[in-house]
Amino acid sequence: MVLIEKPVHGKLRAYGHYPLDAGSIAAVVTRLSLDLTTRKLNQPAMPLPWVLSRLPADQTDCYRRLVNEVGAPHLWWELHALGDPYAREALADEKRCVFVLWEGPIARGLTEWLRTDDHRCEVTMFGLVQQAKGSGHGKRMMRSALWAMQDAGLRLVQIETSTLDDPHALGFYQSLGFVPQSRHVEVFADPRQTGLLPKTQAPGIPLL
């Protein structure tokens, strides 16, 4: 996740109910990690016509469309706020890898990770479009990404998922060996109220 404003950190004072300002959203975020030194990974095969390939730096339009389509049900709003300059910088960043899952000529999913030091990386985006969910390709895509990370000499992978994501996401990551490390509550302005996203987007998340 890309942070637009400097977050305010703190602890909830006690158990109970806490009011939110109008137009705000709260999500519980779980941070997980995977130790790649405890396993030897093999590159999984993708059945044709499915192909996983790194997105070239000049494919900003494809990147933007796919991020928006994958993230639409979950209020992924950061790319809308940061715009095309961020998309160009992200694809040109040597520390960042963006892989796209293709079904023939159609982009069906993406995984993006950022190397944070010589041996660690953060998965900053991962997901499939709605039509590809339940196909088993999400697990193949993540296993391919983990293999590439290990092949690049990375030892620790970190990822976050929240209650705004697919409800199966946490169990999915755990099934691949990720272990929960911490949780926190994130509060932010509803991007549908600020004008970043259409009010009709993510109908499963209440617009209040």
Image: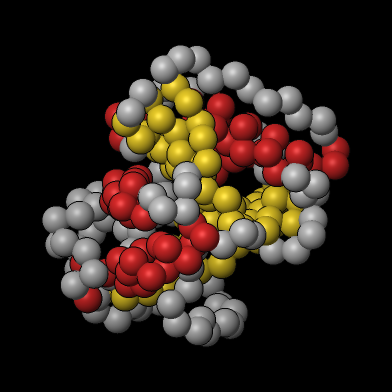
Q: Where is residue 110 in the image (x, y as percent from the top left)?
A: 45, 42
Relative to 195, residue 121 above or below: above
What residue is drawn where x is 38% and y is 50%? 59
Q: Where is residue 48 in the image (x, y as percent from the top left)?
A: 46, 15
Q: Which of 23 and 43 is in front in this view?
A: 43
Relative to 81, residue 7 above or below: below
207 relative to 97 in the view: left or right: left
What residue is drawn where x is 54% and y is 56%? 124
67 relative to 136 in the view: left or right: left
Residue at the far right in the pictured view: 38
What residue is drawn where x is 45% and y is 82%? 5
Q: Point out the image quarter for the C terminus.
A: bottom left
Residue at the far front in the pictured view: 58
What residue is drawn where x is 51% and y is 31%? 52
Q: Position of residue 160 (x, y in %)?
A: 56, 56
Q: Where is residue 153 in the image (x, y as percent from the top left)?
A: 80, 47
Q: Nearer the viewer, residue 186 or 129?
A: 129
Does residue 188 show up?
yes
Q: Which of 138 and 102 is in front in this view?
A: 102
Colour option used: secondary structure
How many marks can you see?
A: 0
Relative to 72, residue 49 above or below: above
Does residue 30 show up?
no
